[in-house]
Image (cartoon, grey):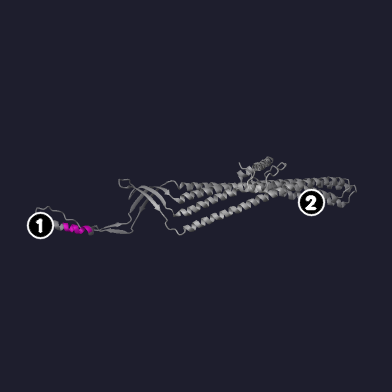
Amino acid sequence: MKISIPALWIFLLSCLAAEGQEAPLEEYIQAALSGNIALQKKELSYEKSLAALQESKALFFPRLSAQARYSVARGGRAFTIPVGDLMNPVYHNLNELNRLVQIAYPDYPTIPEYPMIDNVQENFLRETEQETVVRLQMPVFNNAILYNHRIRQNLSAAEKVSADIYKRELVQEVKVAYFNYAQAAQGAAILENALQLVEENLRTTESLHRNNKVAPDAVYGARAEVAKVEQQLAEAEKNEKVARAYFNFLLNRDYEAAIILPAEASLPEMALSAEEARSLAIQNREEFQQLNYYLSARDNQVQLDKGSFLPQINIQADYGIQGVNYAITGDSDFFLGSAVLSWNIFDPGRNARVQQSKIGKLELEKQRAELQQQAGLQAASAYYGLEAARKRIAQAQAEMEAARQAFRLVDKKFAQGQANLLEFTNARTQMTTAEQNRSIAYFDYQAKLAVFERATASYPFE
């Protein structure tokens, strides 16, 4: 189902109105986005994935390297060159021919005898040897490099989306923590006001006792009520400090830092239906974008595994010098160019790898279908929770106004001695409870609005 444009515009305008009411909160959100340590870790992971992408891209380009080797060898295997065995019979025959010719022809010139020579022994390892090469290598056709680069692109994009997902989580956490603190602070203020009332009641009761209008037990009851409210106030102040510390923790600042409380204002009306909220979640949630990138990576992995049957062609060119010493002479330098074909013709594990990649893709598709159900359920649940919270505000407001009116009447009667302490205590307790309930309902709505924004991914990032 698609969301109608008018409904979407009304919803966005409502959100903008809410943001205008929460100017301090918006500043806190930006501070959290810029200073939260966990988010910084996510962003570093994204930068790391970009570096990995650059690394995969570099494999398309030629590589130039220099390699040098100088070795000293002693001993080892040797081989015999049979120079003596080959040439000594020849020399012997030549010497005999020369001798016979001289006997037959006295004027034949005297020729020295050819000496007998030994076989030559040569070691396989030369005593000293060096080779220095500048090597240029470049892939011409390599299916693995191409699809590995595409996989890295998909994973890098998914890593960026992961940071965006955490941003939304952080915004929700900051908003909920902010309104929890506001509720705790307002709850403490309500109890401070209640403490003033019971202290005034104690003074009135003591005055009535001095004038013999009430019994001593009324004074003890009033003192007990003061102690009870003081205990409740101490617990409320503790809750306020804990809420402040957690909120400041999300902003990565001092736990005792002051927090500007929001100004209470009218709440925007919801302009979406539950079904429209569900559709908005499925359209906007970054989790779906991330899964799409992972699915693309799986597609490329399948192609990579299928393409392992294709040959790889690389070219390589070497230029260098070699010899027993470092010297550039006419015959010491060399050039060697090569075209290398590598073809894995038979690989029994290739089909198994392709099957694994296909199954991995099917798992992701199932995960996406499950995520659609979960996102729709979260959006609908957040919508109904927000709707119920708004109704509770109206109910709590009516209850609070009635309780305040009842307390004012009982308070006047008690000051005139026409109501007893029990009636006063009950009226004061009901008023305090009603004020607390109204405060809880108001800020619970604000917190649930943050949850709804997260469920539908409707918070606007710049």
- Residue under the image location 49 percent in, 57 percent down: 353
Considering depth in this image, is 102 or 285 the residue closer to the camera? 285
- Is residue 255 visible in the rendered image? The answer is no
Q: What is the count of numbered marks?
A: 2
Give the Cα separation between the discs numbered 1 and 2.
148 Å
Residue at which label 2 appears: 228
Read off the magenta span. Answer: 86-94
In the drawing, does residue 430 fall left or right of residue 45? Answer: right
Is 91 magenta? The answer is yes
Q: Quadrant of residue 367?
A: bottom right
Q: What amino acid type should be assigned to the residue bearing mark 1?
A: Ile
Image spot of residue 411 (x, y percent): 85, 46
Q: Earlier in the sequence, mark 1 or mark 2?
A: 1
Considering depth in this image, is 179 or 445 the residue closer to the camera? 445
Would you call the spot at circle 2 few (<14 residues within 10 Å), some (14-19), or many (20 or more)?
few
Is 423 magenta? The answer is no
Q: What amino acid type should be assigned to the residue bearing mark 2?
A: Lys
Report if the CB atoms under discs 1 and 2 are less than 8 Å apart. Answer: no
Image spot of residue 338 (x, y percent): 37, 49
Would you call the spot at circle 1 few (<14 residues within 10 Å), some (14-19), or many (20 or more)?
few
- Residue under the image location 21 percent in, 57 percent down: 87
Image spot of residue 449 (x, y percent): 68, 46
- Is residue 283 visible in the rendered image? The answer is yes
In the drawing, does residue 71 fall left or right of residue 262? Answer: left
Q: Majority secondary structure of the magenta segment?
A: helix
Image spot of residue 172 (x, y percent): 65, 47
Provide the secondary structure element on which disc 2 rests. Answer: helix
Considering depth in this image, is 398 or 47 the residue closer to the camera? 398
Provide the secondary structure element on which disc 1 rests. Answer: helix
Residue at which label 1 appears: 103
